[in-house]
Image (cartoon, rainbow, N blue to C red):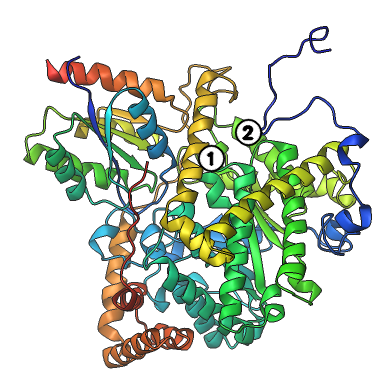
Amino acid sequence: MDRPIKVLMAKAGLDGHDRGVKVIARALRDAGMEVIYTGLHNTPEQIVKAALQEDVDVIGVSILSGAHLVIFRKITELMKHYGMDDVLLVGGGIIPDEDKPLLEAMGVKGLFGPGTSTQEIIDFMRAEVRKLRR
Amino acid sequence: MTEKTPERKDRFITVSNYPIRRLYTPHDIKDLDYERDLGSPGEFPFTRGIYPTMYRGRLWTMRQFAGFGGPEETNQRFKYLLSEGQTGLSTAFDMPTLMGLDSDHPLADGEVGVEGVAIDTLKDFEILFDGIPLEQVSTSFTINPSAPVIYAMYMAIADKQGVPREKLRGTIQNDMLKEFIAQKEWVIPPRPSVDLIVDIFEFGIKETPNFNLISISGYHIREAGATALQELAFTLADGMAYVEAALRRGIDIDQLGPQLSFFFNAHNSFFEEIAKFRAARRIWARVMRERYGAKNPESWKLRFHTQTAGCSLTEQQPLNNIIRVTIQALAAVLGGTQSLHTNSYDEALALPSEEAVRIALRTQQIIAYESGVADTIDPLGGSYFVESLTNEMERAAHTYIKKIEEMGHGSILEGVFAGIENGFFQREIAQAAYEYQKQVESGEQIIVGVNKYTICEDERVKILRVDPEVQRRQIERLARVRAERDNGAVTRALARLEQAARTQENTMPYIIEAVKAYASVGEIMEVLKKVHGAYREPALV
């Protein structure tokens, strides 16, 4: 792969649980990716704008507040609006199984719950970005 | 020796990366002096417990955290828990309420009533406590930036029910330092946040002498990834910082001391957790008496609530979590906790269902009534291992506290502010979390069902979901309250609050006045934001 994968890691909504997002951000960085972390309490608009500005390959959204359906709906709508179909959207946090098909239908490509290994996430991002760049 | 009798692993460590030796002997505690370091239960330095009879006198309070949806649903859950034998209430608020936003705020969309109960105005509180006589329950409120508003609402309800404020029992978490360090819910910056906490201290020692005015919390620090030692050291440093802030205001330490309480996590490494609780009591007793000159024995006693470690629960094979919670709860009881929340096994998946909550409560009841562990005080006292670990934790915590003191040039309060501003705490915690994750991925830390003994799973647990209707209902009620209340009275109350905040007068009486006029959480917090500005953390990885 020519240039490193560029990832925007974002905390959406109001919850402040940033342990997972920070661990993953560091693991992605250690795996050679370029990582931008937004910090806490971002709106969907802020996340999508930052992704556009930074021209990222991947948006990783961490949410543990239970507002994932509302927030991912807004993010995917904004991504469609800006024609960001070459950007991979993934999510992490506490997401019930029965919501996963709904989120996937919206366009969230990978959902990673507690206990996922960072390697699994790295491998997934590499494979998906390879497809998108083709 | 180990060459002849090989061991399973190269090194044995706790979940906090603390090395454990093969065997502990009298040599490991040769400097231990019974009277000086342990003492009888109920006596300085309280290592063995803060009461002379401990659980033989009274069991710990079984306090399950509850709150979801609107105040109607939570009121029902409260009544259910009381009927199931729970002895104290504990309120979880939704994210908008925690962050000081009303349900109709754009950022609240999708979060209303989801992680806890939604509260906008006193109207909601009236519904929340409908049919619950406040003089008969003790109620805990997990709320921080908007703690003064919720505390004011509780007093307003007591006034309405005709219950004298001095009879109110319960706790407000009200610990902003750990928010800036770990939990990350805030409205205004650290210094004015602490001023507001001291307002509550000053007001509460007079008005609600049986209410814990703060719950100095290590729980969230641990959940954010800290080790047991960091949890212990940072929490006690925060406690010392609050004491110093109160002393600056001229508050008598022996008036405040008995109204301070603590809140710790109980994680998987059983003995390390027990040692942590015992060390916490001893350090606090010594610090309060020797460093801050407290003379009232009630000020020396570290009283604490425990919650089992949410971060230890796994999404995989969720029923295994029942066993984890049992071990953690047992550690809390053997560590001498005053109250306990046991997590529900389904919490890595969603909000807990009623069935899962019942099992969690039953876990405590089985420990209390069937296991016999509550029948003698501090049964592990004198164990070479536990005493040695307790000593080591005390020593290592002091090293951290000294470092914080140095950052504050002799003041713990200034040291904690400095540590938040320069990212010291955040970095320490993120580093520990990362190390742990690496140990899990390398297989050094085994998590059953996650990195060993995994199965292909297709079981779906029954989960609780909050009806989106709650958000609509909440916004509607807020609009109705705004239309029906005396808006002139609200404006005047908020103006007086602003004036008090600007002139550094105690804000509590003005917040109560505003609450009674049905000003909303968001409106009151907005005034404080106008005076002190909004906080935003620099994004560090």
Cα distance in 3D space between marks 2 and 1: 12 Å
Q: Which residue is mark 2?
A: B15
Extreme-top residue of the structure: B4
Residue B228 appears in view: yes
Q: Amino acid at mark 2?
A: Val
Chain for mark 2? B
Q: Quadrant of the N terminus of chain B?
A: top right
SS class of the residue under badge 1?
A: helix
In the rendered structure, the answer to whether residue A27 lies left or right of residue B491 reads right
- Label 2 in the same subunit as label 1: yes
Q: Is residue B369 above or below residue A133?
A: below
Q: Taking the image as drawn, is residue B215 in sight?
A: no
Measuring from the top left, give residue B64's x and y in whole percent: 61, 55
Q: Is residue A99 left or right of residue B290?
A: left
Query: In the rendered image, which residue does mark 1 sit on?
Result: B311
- Residue A112 location (% of width, % of height): 37, 30
Residue A51, quarter of the rendered image = top left
Q: Residue at x 60, y 49 (%)?
A: B231
Assess disc 1: are there few (<14), some (14-19) or many (≥20) residues with their C-alpha within 10 Å of its C-alpha: some
Q: Earlier in the sequence, mark 2 or mark 1?
A: 2
Q: Is residue B157 left or right of residue A91?
A: right
Point out the frontmost of discs 2 and 1: 2
Q: Which mark is residue A26?
A: none
